[in-house]
Amino acid sequence: MKSIDDVLHLSHIFGLSQREPGILVVEFIFSIVWQLLDASLDDEGLLELTPEKMSRWATLYQEMDQDRHDNYDVKKTEQVKKMQSVNTLMAIEVIGQFLQDKMSSRLLYLARKNLPKHWLSFVQRLQLLGENSLALKNSKTLTPEAFLQLASDTGIILSRESKTSSQQKFHAVMAFQYLSSSASLCHGATHSALWIPLDLVLEDAMDGYQVSATSAIEIISSLIKTLRAINGTSWHDTFLGLWLAVLRLVQRERDPIEGPMPHLDTRLCMLLCIIPLVVTDLIDEEERTPIDETENGPTSHRKDKKFPGKCRNDLVSSLQVLGDYQSLLAPPQSVAAAANQAAAKAMLFVSGITIGSAYLECLNVKDMPIDCSGNMRHLIVESCIARNLLDTSAYLWPGYVNGCFNQIPQCVPGQVPSWSSFMNGSPLTPAIINALVSSPASSLAELEKIYEIASGGSEEDKISAATILCGASLIRGWNVQEHTVHFIIRLLSPIPVDNTEGYSHLINYAPMLNVLIVGIASVDCVQILSLHGLVPQLVCSLMPICEVFGSCVPNVSWTLPSGEEISAHAVFSNAFILLLRLWRFNHPPLEHGVGDVPTVGSQLTPEYLLLVRNSHLVSSGHIHKDQYRRRLSEIASLLSPNSVFVDSFPKLKVWYRQHQACIASTLSGLVHGTPFHQIVEGLLNMMFRKINRGSQTTVTSGSSSSSGPANEDTSMRPKLPAWDILEATPFVVDAALTACAHGRLSPRELATGLKDLADCLPASLATIVSYFSAEVTRSVWKPEQIRKIVAATGVRVPSLAPGGSSPATLPLPLAAFVSLTITYKIDRASERFLNLAGPALESLAAGCPWPCMPIVASLWTQKAKRWSDFLIFSASRTVFLHNISAVVQLLKSCFSSTLGMNSSPMSSSGGVGALLGPGFKSHFCGGICPVAPGILYLRVYRSIRDIVFLTEEIVSIIMQSVREIVCSEVPRERLEKLRATKDGIKYGQVSLAASMTRVKLAAALGASLVWLSGGSMLVQVLIKETLPSWFISVHRSGQEKSDGMVAMLGGYTLAYFAVLCGAFAWGVDSSSSASKRRPNILGVHMEFMASALDGKFSLGCDSATWRAYVSGFVSLMVGCTPNWVLEVDVQVLKRLSSGLRKMNEEELALALLGVGGVGTMGAAAELVIDSEM
């Protein structure tokens, strides 16, 4: 073969440096067919129609034709023409035989996979010949249609006949029965099961206890591509499944419980802004990818090949079908008016009535001559039109509107304050401001005008514009929400007009900055910013604000147009409290990493968030294919062209280091007589001035005492920068707590003193939280009767003991913290502080060894009765934080409910409806509605400190589920009888398919829970440790005589589970940063499989389970994630292929080598030749 290569220069022509015999064989066969093709095109005069207008082999022909003598007799010309025609036909038929022959077609398939650019040119020439050849039309053995089919990509495959049925059986049983009924989509265990991972991710994003550093657009886009690749769904079914999943998310918020948690606004943001942006990126990616780049892509095995407009048309068809699901489309009461207006807008368009935005703004649907009630589909369509995914032709869809009319409804806009009047030149009067705050902007132009005023208007107009941006446009401006949040972030980082260094210019923007910070401080607003991926940039914007205003003395103040006065301390506290809510600042260092990857929770540190932000900046110099990445890069580069680190903020860094030291060890370093010691004494004197004035026994900081008379007004408050007060706060709280423990300070006085400190500097609440968290975690405080501690709050102390004879107990720091939080009013002014203290209090109480959270919940219930359901649920979660077996039981309940194996009426039908239920419902049958197990798990798992055990438990539950499913689907006695009958074959096939649908659902649920619970770290533990250990270990089921179907389905299920886990964590392609970890982890697992197949160690599991796992895992990689195969070491692939051949899986072995790239092409060719010899 090397001699042939020396003559024909095949390696040079095809650009491959490898000269393995197998590779040269592929190149030789490919060149022969291509030469026959070019000769046929030349004979028929079609070569001129090719882009090159000449044969690829012209140079080779010239070398071979040097000795040719053109001395034909003229009389022989006609004979030559006849012979040429016969030769042309023969050449075309020979090409057809090459494409049909099993061996040669497989070799050509290897050329297709590994020489994509050459193959594209080759296929274009084949199609040119098939469509225009006159000789082909005269063929008696090969029709033009058959030739074109052979020339198509689907006609040239690696495996035509399978010597074994395992791969065909695997793909048959792994395929879902894709049902389209409304019941299955909403509640059943078939169609909706495809999207259970998506339902879980969407619901998990609604957890207000933790924000995400990654955009929900990126997470969901990657998940959609993964599910589509693994399940092989069309774009129509993918989009339909996406819309239905997010509509289920919104419907779970009907009649919600009250409490400090994200509500409907966050869910509507997901439905009407995030998901349309996801769809936009998916369509852009699909339509911009050239056809020749899709051959080696993860979806190239599908029948729906890419071509312009196909994906967008599937979006249209999915939205048209969406109208059939009326129960999911019913709008919540708060958005019914917006839905009705969207329907009225469409109806006016259909009626041919042209109106302006001013008319729409004042239109009342009651004025319409016919019913124009809208639903959620009308809002979805409007959102898609705003992002150019659809046009107004959507209004003409059958059934989209209820009819049309000829008469314009009587509705005269007049001079009503509105966005249209503002755009027409009306100034920002109080009436206009109120109107723009309460109604969302409808276009980017409106937002841009507001932004221009906020960035360059008068001081009063800047404040008004900032207020407008943080109003309805942020919460309900779904069509332009991504622009609203970007404008807000940009305003939080104003650029100095005189190019001064540092951040001192921020002082001039204090009123506007304070309005923005307070405006985005609600739970829903923070969650909306998180969904848009702006948390890292928000952190970067808040840090300089904290640095500057925390260095100011409190007598620096500003007067707002309303007459309210704000101080530097107020601006600092609002910014600092919001900053700390963006990372888990109060969690003790028990959240340590496992292995070489940190836990998901511990990544949310200031350093990590800034690194994420800086990565946006670094990548801004590259052209991003994804729109959302371009947006993040643009805003990062606009606000600060340089990387930002914690070291950039010296004051913040000092506090952060002290905070870390505080939660890691006890306090030390307070030296008597130093200026810092005097600050501590001054704060203690302010807090306990009444005690100090009336008694000589006073509160001390450990090295001196604070005593003496003092005025009771605010003049006692120290005129110190906020950073100085924060630095002293841990020592102040420590002294106060010690004094209370020793009886020198009453519980009431402790609570009052802490509240005075928080009133002096609201930001000190954060340091109080971190100190109390550290003290309780260290368990140095004995339980203390809380009856005295909380007496000042007027709350009756509950009792958990039978009969109520034993008093409830809390550790003193927790009791003091509870007492402090209860002193806050539940109003908008205190909301931003309670949003910080609330989760910290719950985390602190849940982590205590005593049953503290129920006590805290009962105390707070008396304070906020309308939060009772929320507090009861919060208290119930703590059961799982102290008891691992309870977590296992919860996991089992998730599986049994989803699979429909639970006796509960709520979960008897299985599927998403049983797993997640109706969400949180209040006052159901006289009390709180039972919460579905999936909802409970999603609100619990982040607080489980040791999550590694979850992988073993989930694998065990999956395998147990497989056994129960098989036993429930096919009773053993009936199966034994049917096996002996003719009808038993058909029954067994039906039973196998039904069982596989449910075990695949179990695998999808298990993979979702592993990924959500621990991210890529836990997936790494699963792939590298848990699964190998499970296969090596001896199981009881393996020691007994195991049922063959259980063993086989168990192996296939584990394969699907493992591949899904990897796909969730790393993606099916290489677009995410997480994919960089994939080659190492996947390589280790493939090495394990290869070594086991080589017989280097023995396995403890059932041999049928192992065979099914290996064939299933490799089949999924080959068919769904071929990019993964390219990352595995070539020698490992060859060993795996050899092992598969020993298992009589020759076709699968060949398929693995076929997608392994150029490195395995030679081995694949040799295997093709050996198998046919």
Image (tube, rainbow, N blue to C red):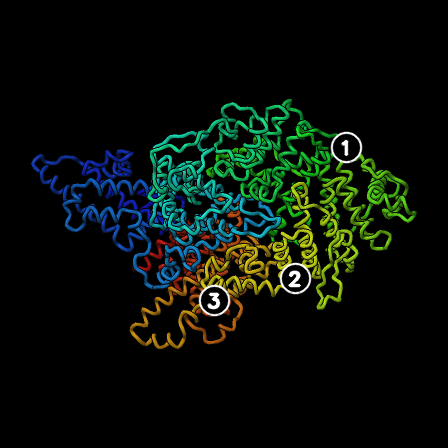
Q: Is residue 433 above or below residue 783?
A: above
SS state under label 2: helix
For the point 73% across and 37% down, the residue is 651
Residue 1147 appears left or right of 625: left
Q: In 3D space, how far apart are the residues under numbered discs 1 and 3 (Cα atoms)?
A: 65 Å
Quadrant of residue 724 within the rendered picture? top right
Question: Dot 3, how many residues are within 10 Å of its Cα: few (below 14), some (14-19), or many (20+)?
Answer: some
Q: Earlier in the sequence, mark 1 or mark 3?
A: 1
Q: Position of residue 678 (x, y in %)?
A: 85, 40
- For disc 1, the marked residue is 553
Going by the numbered disc 3, the residue's amino acid type is Met
Going by the numbered disc 2, the residue's amino acid type is His
Q: Earlier in the sequence, mark 2 or mark 3?
A: 2
Question: Dot 2, how many residues are within 10 Å of its Cα: few (below 14), some (14-19), or many (20+)?
Answer: some
Q: Is residue 674 visible?
A: yes
Quadrant of residue 307 within the rendered picture? top left
Going by the numbered disc 1, the residue's amino acid type is Val
Q: Is residue 15 visible?
A: no
Q: In 3D space, how far apart are the residues under numbered discs 1 and 2 (Cα atoms)?
A: 45 Å
- For disc 2, the marked residue is 882
Residue 1035 appears left or right of 658: left
Between circles 2 and 3, the one closer to the viewer is 3
- For disc 3, the marked residue is 901
Seen from the viewer's position, the closer of residues 1061 and 1137 is 1061
Contact (CB < 8 A) between labels 1 and 3?
Answer: no
For the point 60% across and 49% down, the residue is 261
Q: Is residue 1136 above or below residue 831?
A: below
Q: Position of residue 267 (x, y in %)?
A: 52, 46
Rendered-image quadrant of the C terminus: bottom left
